[in-house]
Amino acid sequence: MTFQTPASLQEAARQEWARIQTLPQPLKPRDRLAIPPQEMPAQDPLARAKNMREVALGYFEEQMRVEASRCLQCKNAPCVAGCPVRIDIPRFIAALAAGDPATAIAVIKETSLLPAVCGRVCPQETQCQAPCTVGKSLKSVDKAVAIGRLERYAADWERLQGQAAAPEVAPETGKKVAVVGSGPAGITVAADVRRAGHAVVLFEAFHKAGGVLVYGIPEFRLPKEIVRAELDTLRRMGVELRTNFVVGRTRKVTDLIEKDGFDAVFIGSGAGLPKFMNIPGENLVGVYSANEYLTRSNLMRAYDREHAVTPIHAAQRVAVLGGGNVAMDAARTALRLGASEVHLIYRRTEAEMPARVEEVAHAKEEGVQFHILQNAKRILGENGKVTGIECLRYELGEPDASGRRRPVEIPGSEFQLPMDAVIVAIGNESNPLIEQTTPGLAVDKNGHIVTDENGRTSLPRVFAGGDIVLGAATVILAMGEGRKAAAAINELLRA
Amino acid sequence: MNQILFKEQLAPNVYRLRVHAPLIAEERQPGQFVILQLDTEFGERIPLTIADANLAEGSITLIFQAVGKSTKLLAQMQTGEKIANLVGPLGRPTHIAKFGTVVCVGGGIGVAPLYPIAQAMRRAGNRLVVVMGARSRELVILEPEMRALTDDVVVCTDDGSYGRRGLVTEPLRELCAQTPKPDLAVAIGPPLMMKFCAETTRPFGVPTVVSLNTIMIDGTGMCGGCRVTVGGRTKFVCVDGPEFDGHQVDFDQMIQRLGSYREQERLASAGCNLHDEAVRKGLQE
């Protein structure tokens, strides 16, 4: 992918839109398939690697019209089946193609609560865009209709109009629901349950609400202003937000029901303890979990060295271990914090990386150096501080249980790289805090809360969803889970 | 919530606050801590052990030493002011049971988190011996409170200005050498003091619990910044601790990790002084 300036993308779209209008209307499928896919305008890679502002700038209006015109309006709408919250995608895209973003956002909001967030961070290429007929016809998922970018356009358009209308709330029922965790799952449940007229208290352990949207995903990928706007909408709906409240410690789940009068509890406490590699040197000074590194930079604002009290190492040479979206976020954050070299070390190949293609491309454009088929064997240190990393080379062997070819180490292939910080981004284990303090709550062998398909746990009136149930997943999957649990809670409280 | 109800200075740079936090007061148990932050946008989150609680008042007691940027700011706050963010109680509570004879050893500010543990150990029917140490007389805190729990209180000062001259490890060694030896030692204080207490009790086989105060952000297991090596395995102080078997803790590594940001902290604290110096120089020139 070569970088194209926003101005050139806008000019090309302007010309294309003019061309489209000369075609006989309505457009034939053949004409639609001939329209070039619209690239997302972005900040210049070299400039953006030194600032925290959002990388992807959003479509120009001309680009939106052109991209929306690519949609074939399939009757069977395979895209909708690919969306965890079943947005009526063809209908909102038709509205955009007609130049009516107000209708488009209204359609999206019938089913999705956080379009400005999902339009930015959803893995559309494996969800709605994967089965897109346009992509299939052009034999590349990269050429599918850019549903996510169009969703973002509609959501941003609404936000720029001023305060978005808060969803309507049914008359008060007198019932009360506790929602534990203010990330994507919790936000969804809070909104859906509140809409049914139940009082909702949303509990957050940190001093700021938003969960992973605030502590995990960096500003340059999801501006915190957007998260704040979504939380404000919840407040205007009458949801009470209680920060600095660790359910399980400040109050136990069972006490919320038995002592505090909540009629139901939803647990959406999110990802848990960071995994480490269990290699020598992991507790040296300068070794971070990605959770810690990102939380220091995002939530605690360590990137703002002038104002923030929370420190972060000003490392020059940084190794990031892992190949997921969190690894990309950590690597790109390290660049923005002033690292001169960032090395991403992953033991399989790029094809197996769990990160989104777009995130990988962005990281490369910004100068992150990829080391594939390599893995850290030990972290080297002097006087307790990181000085380097010893890696092993791998080759791909037979497919493993996940269907991916298993990386096999090449004996004797050790080599060392000097480093002054190492960030471990290989996922999370479930957080034991709620399980430990909630007798009778069933969890599986990995510590994830066991639920039925509607989010019901082994305890009456207690529901769960998001990463605490799924393990590490995505924002939209957590929202989908939350949506089902909210429906089950509303059903329970109707009785 | 979070108002400072009462503030007093216990020793040079050591302060006691009672803070309105009814939920934490109700739930807290000995050994647990809170995390506080003085500025929601840019403040740091610092863990402080809960020294006491008053259910009637709905308050918790925090005792801290003004050493870093945030604790210095906290020391400047007045009665009636509110702490922006206060969360807890965090960490696993102390295992309280009837062990027999329990020696509670506190060093400096570590006497504060030791107090509720000593209190609970006494209530559980243990014979309680308290050894408390400080650099000098003016830094001895909570002596009357400890004496109200037990007649067996030994105070040591490094400079001999009060009580016994010397380190807490000396009376601890004498206690361990007695027959019967203590059934449990609980040592809380600076990392080096805890390390040497553990080394003192080790040859006598007296089980020794230490309470670690490492760098942490969330305090709920999410960041892993607080990790320590205990018995060769990585543990998180916030969810696995803060108390561990002192004979198993890798104190040297913990001390190194505590110093992770020493340079940044020095600069942050020195900021004001440098500025003052610059101003003075400016005036002279």
Image (cartoon, coloured by chain):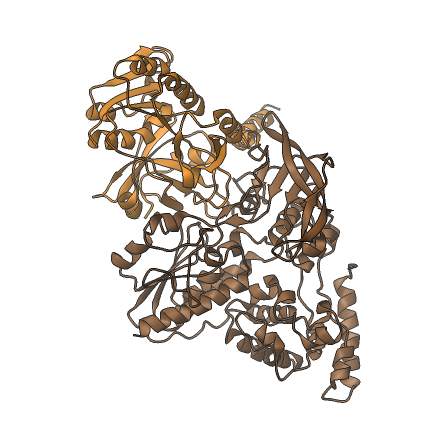
Chain colours: A brown, B orange
Image vertical order of residue A211 relative to residue A171, above or below: above
Q: Residue at x 54, y 61 (%)?
A: A475
Image vertical order of residue A165 relative to residue A315, above or below: below
Image vertical order of residue B255 relative to residue A317, above or below: above
For the view shown, which residue lies furthest in the front direction? A398
Q: Residue at x 35, y 50 (%)?
A: A248
Image vertical order of residue A164 relative to residue A270, above or below: below
**Direction from residue B111 to residue B149 in the image, left or right:** left
Q: Position of residue A318 (x, y in %)?
A: 67, 40
**Direction from residue A54 to residue B211 in the image, left or right:** left
Q: Position of residue A67 (x, y in %)?
A: 70, 74
**Direction from residue B239 to residue A85 in the image, left or right:** right
Q: Position of residue B202 (x, y in %)?
A: 39, 19
Q: Position of residue A472 (x, y in %)?
A: 53, 55
Residue A172 appearing in the image: no
**Residue toward you, A432 or A406:** A406
**Residue toward you, B211 or A198:** B211
Q: How many marks overall?
A: 0
